[in-house]
Amino acid sequence: MRGAPSRTLVLLAACLAVSPPLALGCGYQLVRYRDALGDARSVAILGVRNETLEPGVDSLVTDALQREFLRRGALRIVQDADAADLVIGGAVERLATRSLAFSSIQFAVEYEVTLELDLEVRRRDGSPVPLDPRGLAETELYLSSADVESARKNRQEALRRLSSLLAERVHDALFERLAP
């Protein structure tokens, strides 16, 4: 009797292995990640221009875009825009900071920073791949501090998180737009 449950499991596994896939009726299907981009296999990420007064925010955004595409690995990053299937470029359009919460003696203790990008994606033939501009703006909170260096680091980390989040959105938007 001890072998009966194991024989049943082996028999069930064998039946499932040779039977056609079950249709669950959920409407989902497996799609290979690579096929979601159609014929695009490479991307060139041009340096993003800085249209704000914040030094270095353009580098943060450009680095975040490159990291995101490297992390996901579906597109090969190339330096030559003429050799790329997709070219991403544009600008950091707006960077705004405002105080959000105050202490009892009117010192700001929490700030809100908003980052807005104006990016464009073009195919090799020059045709644009539209991106929803609503997905290219985001806001992040950060804490103030009596220590100036701590406050600066908190703001810088908020800008890094915003850059990474917006880079993820650009990557995901491309997969949605280019899916067959």
Image (cartoon, rainbow, N blue to C red):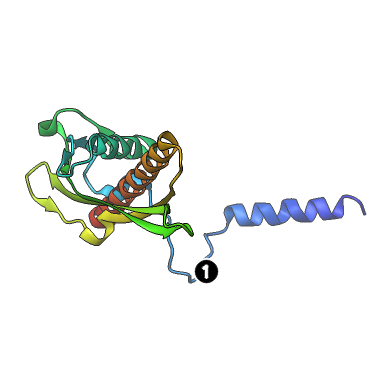
Residue 179 makes an appearance in the image: no
99 lies above or below 45: below
18 lies above or below 75: below
Depth check, front residue: 18 or 169: 169
Name which residue type carries label 1: Leu
Q: Is residue 154 toward the left or the right of residue 2 in the image? A: left
Extreme top residue here? Answer: 79
Q: Residue at x 11, y 41 (%)?
A: 124
Q: Residue at x 20, y 56 (%)?
A: 131
Question: Circle 1 — which element?
Answer: loop
Image x and y of residue 102, in percent: 43, 58
Residue for badge 1: 24
The crowding category of the residue bearing disc 1, from other C-alpha atoms within 10 Å (few below 14, some 14 to 19, many at least 20), is: few
Image x and y of residue 173, in percent: 28, 54
Q: Is residue 171 toward the left or the right of residue 124 in the image? A: right
156 lies above or below 26: above
Residue 12 in which image quadrant: bottom right
Image x and y of residue 50, in percent: 17, 40
Quarter of the picture containing the N terminus is bottom right
Q: Residue at x 52, y 59 (%)?
A: 20
Depth check, front residue: 150 or 108: 108
Image x and y of residue 77, in percent: 25, 32
